[in-house]
Image: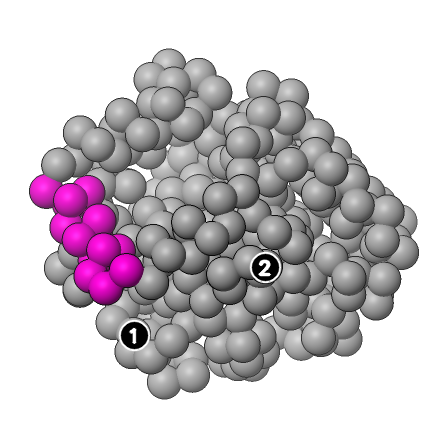
Amino acid sequence: MGWRPEHRSEAIWMRHVDITVGGGPVRVYLAGEAGPALVLLHGAMLDTGLGVWHDVIADLARDHRVYVVDLPRHGGSRPWRGTLDDRFYRRFMGALLDELGLDRVGLIGLSLGGGVATGFALEHPDRVDALVAIGPGGLDAVRPYQFLTWVVTRTPGLLRATSWLLARFPGLVRSSLAATLTAGVDTPGFDRIVGSAVEEALAKNRHGERALDDWQVQAYAPRTMRVYLTPELHRLAVPTLWIRGSGDPLVGADVLDEAHARTPDSQLVAIAGAGHIVTYDQPAEVLRVLREFLRSRRE
């Protein structure tokens, strides 16, 4: 397939492969002909691989083999059955790398993808040569509104009704993104971002999926988080870069400060003028930080 990133004069040729991993379909977009392998994992809810990573793929593909994954129940990776929780993803990531013929990779994950990548790197450091976790999930012992969120996620039918609502009223998706992104409707590529999210909302409703991912839902217990990786980070035997948007309302500065302090070989960068999805808010700065870290790992 052909693909041209916005704000760039060069074109990048991409193709995708549809593979079966752990009994379900997975779409992976490929870019770059040579160099170390990078696997990019997006966030939850209405995120997709080509959505979140749209503005960084072309640059990274100049000297890396880039694998942009649509995680199960996102983008082209449908349909899936069963519960896709943290335990599932630790198995899934190893099987995915096996299916792609990749022994060791750099993992770059945002939000849900950052939590998945961190969990896999903890369990399989032999398969990860660098980890970048951007606003990752899984680092809080207790989340804001912990009990209320747990109740909401366990209310029968509510999360599927939310998928229906977002699909039926795309203006809700647009207004939510306008409020979430630092520059609002002036964000470069805003209409493309909204279009991708609306398409994802329609797909979730069409496939009868819930608005939240199982990884998110199953991470919650009534009073504490079931997925809490921070106490394990002293075992993280992988060069690690923690990234947080300075205005991220979902992942606090104190959370990543502690993650950085506990991780033996890590760096921490806060990106000014960015919220939770830093690749939408400040893609050029994200690329600069990524390139500096990846270059340092090769020297």
Q: Are marks 1 and 2 in contact (CB under 8 Å)?
A: no
Residue 172 highlighted magenta (yes or no): no
- Residue type at mark 1 is Trp
For marks 1 and 2, the one nearer the N-term is 1
Residue 239: mark in rendering: none
Residue 80: mark in rendering: 1
- Left or right: 125 as drawn, with respect to 132: right
Span of residues in magenta: 155-168
16 and 240: which is toward the camera: 240
Q: Within 10 Å of the Cα at label 2, are there few (<14), some (14-19), or many (20+) other Cα atoms? A: some
Q: Position of residue 108 (x, y in %)?
A: 61, 52
For residue 81, above or below residue 220: below
Callout 1: helix, strand or loop?
A: loop
Q: Position of residue 161 (x, y in %)?
A: 17, 53
For residue 278, above or below residue 15: above
The residue drawn where x is 42% and y is 57% is: 150
The residue drawn where x is 38% and y is 43% is: 51
The residue drawn where x is 42% and y is 61% is: 217
